[in-house]
Image (spheres, rainbow, N blue to C red):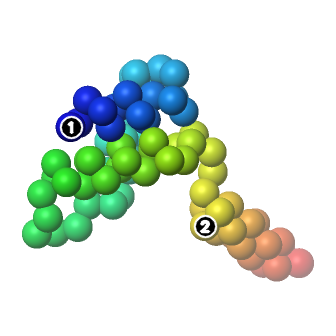
Amino acid sequence: MRSDLIFGALTHVSNRYELCQLASKATRKLHKPNTRLQDTTNEVLDRFRDADPTTETPRAAAHSAGAASADVRRAA
């Protein structure tokens, strides 16, 4: 049930408003055409239960580090 997923996700995010904001952003990024939006939302909440959504992902960290090094190369 969705309520179980929400309460599981609240273990990492204490503020319900912040959980809604993070879940909506993640749902927009992960949603694939021809799938139900409800299923994507449930998948996001399930991921939030297992991992802290407020921490930066390794892929995003690598992307920002790559962008910073690219800026350094351009400036040199």
Within-10-Å neighbours for mark 1: few <14, some 14–19, many 20+:
few
Q: Relative to 21, say whether 61 is above or below.
A: below
Q: Name, please, the residue furthest toward the right.
A: 76
Describe the element under mark 2 as helix, strand or loop: helix
Q: Please give left or right for residue 45 compared with residue 41 in the image.
A: right
Query: Residue visible at 45% across and 42% down?
Result: 49
Rendering coords of residue 56 (x, y %): 63, 51
Q: Relative to 73, say whether 59 is above or below.
A: above
Q: Please give left or right for residue 44 compared with residue 34 in the image.
A: right
**Circle number at residue 1:** 1
Q: Which of 36 and 61 lies nearest the eye of the viewer?
A: 36
- Residue that badge 2 annotates: 59
Rendering coords of residue 47 (x, y %): 43, 51
Q: Quadrant of the C terminus?
A: bottom right
Rendering coords of residue 35 (x, y %): 14, 64
User: Given this view, does label 2 or label 1 mark the residue nearer the observer?
Assistant: 1
Kind of residue sitting beneath label 2 = Arg
Q: Please give left or right for residue 50 compared with residue 73 in the image.
A: left
Describe the element under mark 1 as helix, strand or loop: loop
Quadrant housing residue 34 = bottom left
Q: Quadrant of the N terminus?
A: top left
> For the residues marked 2 and 1, what is the alpha-carbon distance in whole angstroms?
30 Å
Q: Relative to 61, say whether 56 is above or below.
A: above
Q: Which of 62 and 6 lies nearest the eye of the viewer?
A: 6
**Circle number at residue 17:** none
Label located before the other in sequence (2 or 1): 1
Kind of residue sitting beneath label 1 = Met
Q: Which of 19 and 5 lies nearest the eye of the viewer?
A: 5
Rendering coords of residue 53 (x, y %): 52, 43
Q: Is residue 19 visible?
A: no
Query: Residue visible at 26% across and 47% down?
Result: 41
